[in-house]
Image: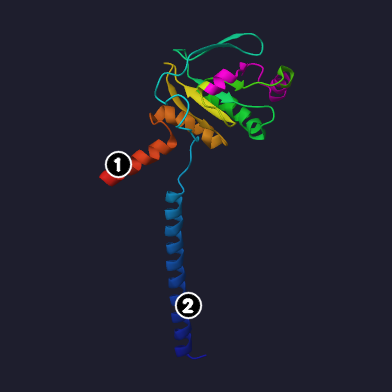
Amino acid sequence: MSIESLSVIVFVLCVAVTLLVVLVLALARQIGVLHTRLAPAGALMNTSAGPDVGAPAPKLSLQDINGTPVQIGGASASPLLILFVSPSCPICKELVPVARSMARAEKLRLLFASDGGKIDKHIDYVGKMDIADYPYLLSSELGLKFAASKLPYAALIDSDGVLRSRGLVNSREHLESLVESMLSGYDSLQDYLVKEQQLEQAS
């Protein structure tokens, strides 16, 4: 094979490699654009019903399934995470251990709530999920106050009794977004994204 032929082959290979590099860079840019457009979603909040985030949480004096008094709302020593669950909810079963772990890590008080049904079923559920150390409430009033129309649903009240975040939580990320909202001062992750976009446009 002549030197001219080798030179042509090397030239063609260099062009092919250059084209591949350009193609990879273009694909990487498109992935970045998609990542920006598909921003992470936090807990899904129904803004047409329920208490306003940033306002004092509803105050309720209730009893858990053991008859122990439980106070919802008002000032307390630490923030309160309420997780609305049901024995028939498969996603709830996955989130219960996540909520327990998060409550320990973030030093939150944690209570579980459901809107009714046979108490024996809930007592069995408490045992199976190993949450006997946490208050478990059966109260349709509590669900109505926080607009917990779908499960699993959660609400986070800070130590001053202010509702910091609430919404439908279908994953660990949704549940964690409630704490992030409280720490960041934004009503929700969606609120954060909207305000950040407005700041970028203003600048």
**Label of residue 133 in the image:** none
Tell me if 177 is positioned left or right of 130 in this view. Answer: left
Choose top left, top right, bottom left or bottom right for residue 144. top right
Name of the residue lying farthest toward the front = 48
The answer, for residue 81, to whether it is visible in the render is no
The answer, for residue 34, to whether it is visible in the render is yes
Which residue occupies the foreground of this view, 143 or 71? 143
- Give the labeled residue for mark 2: 13
Pointer 2: residues within 10 angstroms few (<14), some, or many (20+)? few
Which segment is the magenta one?
Answer: 122-144
Residue 163: x and y in percent read: 44, 22
Tell me if 175 is positioned left or right of 122 in this view. Answer: left
Residue 95 drawn above or below residue 104: below
Q: Is residue 170 magenta?
A: no
Residue 90: x and y in percent read: 67, 34
Residue 130: x and y in percent read: 68, 22
The C terminus, quarter of image: top left
Residue 12 drawn above or below residue 197: below
Tell me if 42 is positioned left or right of 123 in this view. Answer: left
Number of dots carrying numbers: 2
Q: Are marks 2 and 1 in contact (CB under 8 Å)?
A: no
Q: Amino acid at mark 2?
A: Leu
Where disc 1 sits, the SS reads: helix
Of pointers 2 and 1, the one earlier in the residue sequence: 2
Give the mark toward the camera: 2 or 1.
1
- Give the labeled residue for mark 1: 199
Which residue occupies the foreground of this view, 163 or 142? 142
Q: Amino acid at mark 1?
A: Leu
Q: Is residue 124 magenta?
A: yes
Where disc 2 sits, the SS reads: helix
